[in-house]
Amino acid sequence: MKTIVYLDGFNLYYRMLKERPQYKWLNPLELATEVLDPANQIIKLWYFTAHVSARVDRDAPARQRIYLDALKTVPTIEARFGKFLVKKRWAGLVLPDLDPAKPQAKPPFLPWPNVVRIWRTDEKGSDVNLATQLLIDSFKNNYEVAVVITNDTDLVAPIRFATKEMKKIVGILTPYQIPRPR
């Protein structure tokens, strides 16, 4: 069956790979090939991601560039990019839970602030790009089976449209949090 894989790169990274450096350089096409039935002939793997920021780790963009360059050597894989936004924001502060066994306990400093200044990082556009490509390929009849690798519930509506309205087979592979080794 003619199969296209749609990979939410950030979802996979944060749910499975971030804490597992030995897997960060995985070939997503090999992963999909291992997981799917041999009857699925993967004709394309769309890799949706964004260029990372150097704010937290100045070497991260260079490492990502090397990985993306490696993916370019696999003709079946094509990357599509959203944006990675980094902004200073104010956010409400969660007060610490004080030990109920110590009724005289007080917060470490008073007055306790209501808000704090934070760095807010957001990846924007990758899920919209994935949904759009899934629907374009559905309308063009580019696949018999689509496989979406994500845990993002924002993709429920386009997947539902492809299955219900376009009568396509769409499978979902959900990356899951692997417990840290102890």
Image (tube, rainbow, N blue to C red):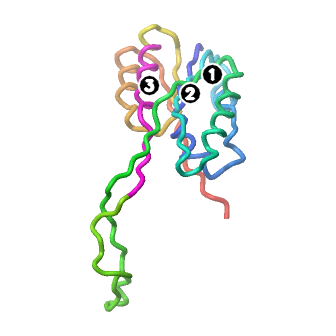
Look at label 1 and name its amino acid: Ile
**Could you tell me which residue is drawn at 52 percent across and 32 percent down?**
49
**Local crowd size for mark 2, using a 10 Å CA cut-off: few (<14), some (14–19), many (≥20):** many
Dividing the image into 4 quarters, which one contains the C terminus?
bottom right
Q: Residue at x 53, y 42 (%)?
A: 53
State the CA–CA distance, disc 3 to disc 1.
15 Å
- The three-letter amino acid code for the residue at tag 3 is Asn
Q: Are marks 2 and 1 in contact (CB under 8 Å)?
A: yes
Which residue occupies the foreground of this view, 18 or 124? 124
**Magenta region, residue range:** 118-137
Query: Is disc 3 in contact with disc 2, using a CB cutoff of under 8 Å?
Result: no
Q: Position of residue 46 (x, y in %)?
A: 56, 23
Q: Which residue is mark 1?
A: 77
Position of residue 110 measured from the top left corner of the image (x, y, whole percent): 30, 81
Q: Quadrant of the N terminus?
A: top right
Task: Using the image, determine if residue 48 lies above or below residue 179.
Answer: above
Q: Nearer the viewer, residue 8 or 143?
A: 8
Task: Give left or right: position of 66 versus 48.
Answer: right
Q: Percent from the top left, x then y, of residue 65? A: 64, 33
Query: Is 116 covered by the magenta stretch?
Result: no
- Closer to the chain start, of discs 3 and 2, is 2
In the image, residue 77 above or below residue 120: above
Q: Horizontal and vertical percent for residue 140?
A: 45, 7
For the point 53% across and 26% down, the residue is: 6
Label 1 neighbour load within 10 Å: few <14, some 14-19, many 20+:
some
Q: Quadrant of residue 122?
A: top left
Q: Which residue is mark 2?
A: 47
Q: Name the residue beneath numbered marker 3.
A: 129
Q: Which mark sits nearer the N-terminus, 3 or 1?
A: 1
